[in-house]
Image (cartoon, rainbow, N blue to C red):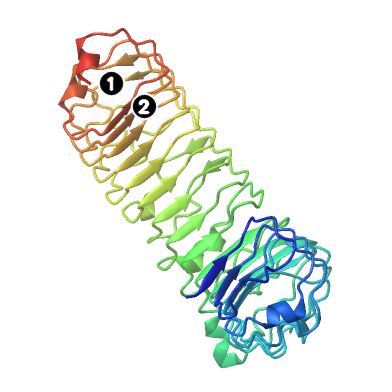
Amino acid sequence: MKSALCSGQDLEAIPNHLPSNLEYLDLGENRIESIDFDTISAFLHLESLNLSNNPLQTLEMNIFQNLSRLQYLDLTGCNLEDVPTAVFNNTKLRVIRGMKVDRAPCNLFEGFNSLRHVTIHAERLQSIHKDTFRALVNVQKISLYLNDMETLPSELFNSVGEATEKRRLKNIKIKGVNALPWDIFSELSYLKWLTIHDLKTPMSNNFTQDQEVLSSLDLSHNELTQLDPGWFEGLRLDLKTLNLSHNLLTELNDELSCLEEVSHINLSYNRIRKLNDQSFFNFRRALIELDLSHNDIHDVSPTLFSDMVNLRTLHLNHNHINEMPPLLFDGISGLHNLFLQYNNIDSLKQDNFTDLENIEHLDLSHNNISLLGDYTFYHLETMKILDLSHNEIEALPKDLISIGILDQIHLQGNPLHCDCGIKLL
C-alpha cells in the first residue's frame, strides 16, 4: 500500500508534494483547520484517511465526492460540530470514526450501504430516532458516545437493515445513556460483543435473555454496587469474557453462578472486600485469566482458587492482603503469571508456592516482606522473572541459586546485607 505518514508534523494544511497515487494518508495530530477541495480530490486512489485530533471546524459539502475508493475515515478529536452525511456522498466508506452529530433523524445514513463500522460522538444530542440506523444494511459495529442522554428507543438496533441482515451487527458500544429499555437488544441474536459504560440506572434483569452467541460483555465504568444474576442467565455457555472493572462492587457471592464457560474476568478497580468459595465455583475450570487487582481485599479463602486447572494469569496486586494461607495456590499448577505487588505481605513461607510448577513471572514487589523461608522458591524451576523489589528483605534464601532459568531478579529497594549468595546471583 502506498502511504504517507504525516502525523504530528505541526501541519496547517495538506502538503502539496504528496504523490497523487496514495492509498493511505495519515494527517493526525496536526493543526489543520480546513480541507481544500482541490487538494484532497487529487488522491483518487485514497482508501484510508486519518484526520484525527486536528482543529477542523467544518467540512465542505461533498468534500470527498472524488474519493470513490475511500473506505476508512477517522475524525476523532476534531472540532467538527455537526457533520452532514452529504459530506460522504460517492464514497464506499466502510469505517467512520469520531463522527459528531447534533441531530439523529431517520435518514441520517441514507445511501451508506457499504458502512461496516460507525462511531458517533453526540455530546449535545438529546434524542435519537428509532430508525437512525435502518439504512445500514451491512453494518457490523456501532459505537455511540453520548452525554447524559435519558434513554434510547427500544427499536434502535432492532431496526438496523432488513430483517435478514440483522445478523451482521455483531458489536455494539454505548456510553453516556442514563437508562436502557429492557428489550433494546431483543432481536439481535447474533450479537457477539456488547459494551455499556456510564449507565446511571442498572439494566433490567433480563436484558441479555435473547443473546444466544454473546461472547464478550463489558459492563465496566457503570458505578454498579451489586450484580443481578438475571443479567447472565442467558449467557451460560457462550460468554467467554466479562469485564466488571471500575465499578463500586463490595462483594461477590454466587451472582455469576449460572456462567459455565467464561475464561476471562476483570473485577479490578472495585471495592471488593469479600470473596467466598462460590464466587467462581461453576466456571473455575474454564478460567484462564482473573483480575482482582485494585480492590480492598484483606483476606483470601484458602480454597478460593482450588481446581482452577486452566488459570494462567492471576492479578491480586494493589489490595490489602497481609498473609497468604498455606497452599492458597494449590490446584492451579498451570499458572504462568502471578501478581501480588502493592499488598501488605510481611513474610513468605515454604508452602506458599509449592504447587506453582509452571510459574514464569512472580511479582511480590512493594510489600513489607522481611522474612523469606529457605525453600520458598525451591520448586519454581520454570520461573523466569522474580520481582522482590521494595520490601524489607535483609537476606536471601539459598534456594534462589537453584532456579536454573531465572532471567531477571529485581531486588532494588531492600536493606540487603551483601554475602556470597548475593554475589552468585
* Residue 179 showing in the rendered view: no
User: Residue 184 sits in which quadrant?
Assistant: bottom right
Q: Of residues 322 and 420, which is closer to you in this image?
A: 420
- How many numbered discs sit on the rendered protein? 2
Q: Of residues 15 and 180, which is closer to you in this image?
A: 15
User: Residue 136 sits in which quadrant?
Assistant: bottom right
Mark carried by residue 185: none
* Residue type at numbered disc 2: Met
Image-based side of 209 in relation to 277, left or right: right
For the point 22% across and 15% down, which residue is it? 423
Residue, disc 1: 349
For disc 1, the neighbor class at 10 Å (few under 14, some 14 to 19, many from 20) is: some
Q: Position of residue 414 (x, y in %)?
A: 39, 15
Q: Position of residue 62 (x, y in %)?
A: 76, 85
Q: Earlier in the sequence, mark 2 or mark 1?
A: 2
For the point 50% across and 32% down, which residue is it? 318
Label 2 close to label 1 by CB (< 8 Å): yes
Mark carried by residue 324: 2
* Residue type at numbered disc 1: Lys
Image-based side of 246 in relation to 404, left or right: right
The Cα–Cα distance between marks 2 and 1, rounded to whole angstroms, is 9 Å
For the point 64% across and 82% down, which residue is it? 158
Q: Position of residue 36 (x, y in %)?
A: 77, 75
Rendered position, 331 above or below 242: above
Name the residue at the front extreme: 17
User: Residue 16 sits in which quadrant?
Assistant: bottom right
Q: Position of residue 98 (x, y in %)?
A: 69, 67
Rendered position, 176 above or below 37: above
